[in-house]
Amino acid sequence: MAFRPAVGPLTATPGASGTFGLGCAPIGNLYTEVADEDATATVRAALAHGIRFFDTAPHYGAGASELRLGRALRGVDRDSVSIATKVGRRIVDSAGASVAAGATGVDTVGDLSADGVLRSVEGSLLRLGTDRIDLLHLHDPMDIDEALRVTIPAMVALREQGVVRAIGAGMVWPGPLTRLVREAGLDVVMIAGRITLLDRSAEAELLPAAAERGVGVIAAGVFNSGILADPEGTPFFDYRQATPEMRDRALRLRDICRDRGVTLADAAARYPLRRPGVEGVVIGARTPDEVAAFARSETAPIPEELWAELAAA
């Protein structure tokens, strides 16, 4: 599979990845402060490795991720890259007041209003330094009824106006996302951490519903917060310390991969693309070395029999 034309770059780059994208939460200071120049180096490394799909959000660093991504992409042919960002949260300053359009802040708060959508997109365009958004996601809405009644129609209008090329929703929970697939008229959805070697809970309902409605699926959080990248060095699952049972499961998967000459991280990055309807994978990176590692995963040799062994485990 590959990112569908509605969300991919308008101009193809020979040799570029059609399935892997860079998740830009880490360059928005997720968990660790990142210097501006290091963020630029990470994005530039992604470009050098053929990555052309970039996923960001106002929530990531309260605008910092968008600002840094926009700066790093200056001078790059806009049609050769695809930028996804999100709505549903409003950036605020230390006093809790909304920041000016295009500014950064210290936090975000939920805002599913139609005006909130317009203001969010205005700010994103300014921070990114672009005149369009390729893919606009609704970001983890707490109230699905309000999202369907208010937020989604505002996003549809922006798609009709050409301000955004495609609309979607990004969430951690398969149930609400499945409802949006069935009722919202989305182009794609992004599910985080639920189509992985450790958590396949999105496969029961979300993937069949997406296939039925013709909605594309992008998998994010493929390392489940780190445990599938390195069970010993980063034993975190769903943003928390992994339980001993979960860590033992991950170590068992790692050992099975090692016996086949494959790294667990490579298998974890590629696994979602084996599921029906999954068109792309978004992987976060903080450094050029992390980019190089996941970029190698796309073409790393993986014996077919390994997948059956991992499933059995």
Image (cartoon, rainbow, N blue to C red):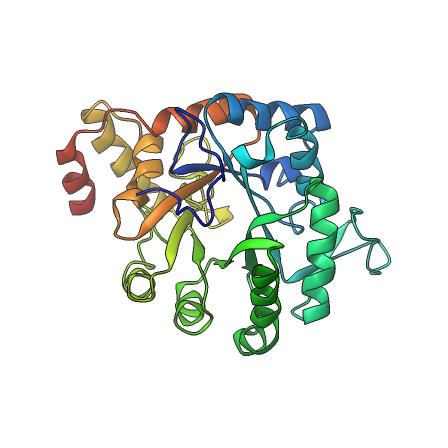
Q: Which residue is located at x 59 percent, y 37 percent?
A: 26
Relative image position of residue 241 (x, y in whole percent): 48, 46
Q: The N terminus appears in which quarter of the rendering?
A: top left
> Does the rendering let one see residue 75?
yes
> Does the rendering let one see residue 110?
no
Relative image position of residue 205 (x, y in whole percent): 30, 66
Q: Which residue is located at x 31 percent, y 60 percent?
A: 207
Determine whether 96 is above or below 72 in the image.
below
Which quadrant holds residue 145?
bottom right
Q: How many marks?
A: 0
Determine whether 148 is above or below 285 in the image.
below
Q: Which residue is located at x 45 percent, y 26 percent?
A: 50
Which quadrant holds residue 139?
bottom right
Q: Which residue is located at x 44 percent, y 57 percent?
A: 189
- State left or right for residue 271 relative to residue 116: left
- State left or right for residue 256 relative to residue 45: left
Determine whether 197 is above or below 118 in the image.
above
Which quadrant holds residue 83?
top right
Relative image position of residue 262 (x, y in whole percent): 26, 26
Relative image position of residue 234 (x, y in whole percent): 46, 35
Q: Looking at the picture, tell me which residue is in the foreground, 296 or 246.
A: 296
Q: Looking at the picture, tell me which residue is in the foreground, 124 or 77.
A: 77
